[in-house]
Amino acid sequence: MSDTVKIEMVEQLEPFSDNPWFGVRVNDKTVKWCRDKETAQAIYDEIISDPSVLKTKENILYSQDIIVPLDK
């Protein structure tokens, strides 16, 4: 099974500024904004080559089972 995902790299020019922002969006949600076009391009290329990088990764740092008495 697969989904269609829209991936965009955009350049944003702000009024009164000569320095554009470059952004990467996935399905109209921002992934990253930066001033460096090459950095944005690298992020865009990484997403295109491996969309799984968009998945949140979770590492359990600590875990312990404890017994809690129910009566006082």
Image (cartoon, grey):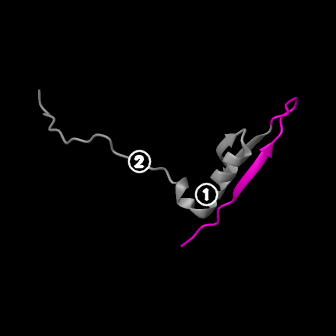
Query: Which quadrant of the structure image shows residue 60?
Result: top left
Q: Would residue 29 appear left or right of 52 to someone viewing this image?
A: right
Residue receiving disc 2: 58
Residue 35 at x, y percent in the picture? 72, 38
> CA gap, disc 1 to disc 2?
19 Å
Point out residue 42 in the picture as x, y percentages from the top left corner. 65, 52
Helix, strand or loop at label 2? It is: loop
Nearest the viewer among 7 and 44 is 44
Considering depth in this image, is 38 or 17 the residue closer to the camera? 38
Q: Residue at x 60, y 63 (%)?
A: 49
Q: Is 63 drawn above or below residue 52 in the view shown?
A: above
Task: Tell me the quarter of the image containing the C terminus.
Answer: top left
- Residue assigned mark 1: 47
Hey, what amino acid is under mark 2? Glu
Q: Which residues are magenta?
A: 1-19
Q: Vertical placement of 5 versus 19: above or below?
A: below
**Residue drawn 80% across and 38% down?**
20
Q: Any mark on residue 17, and which? A: none
Residue 7 lies within the magenta run: yes
Quarter residue 62 falls in: top left
The verdict on residue 33 being magenta is no
Q: Secondary structure at mark 1?
A: helix
* Residue 2, x across and y down, in percent: 57, 70
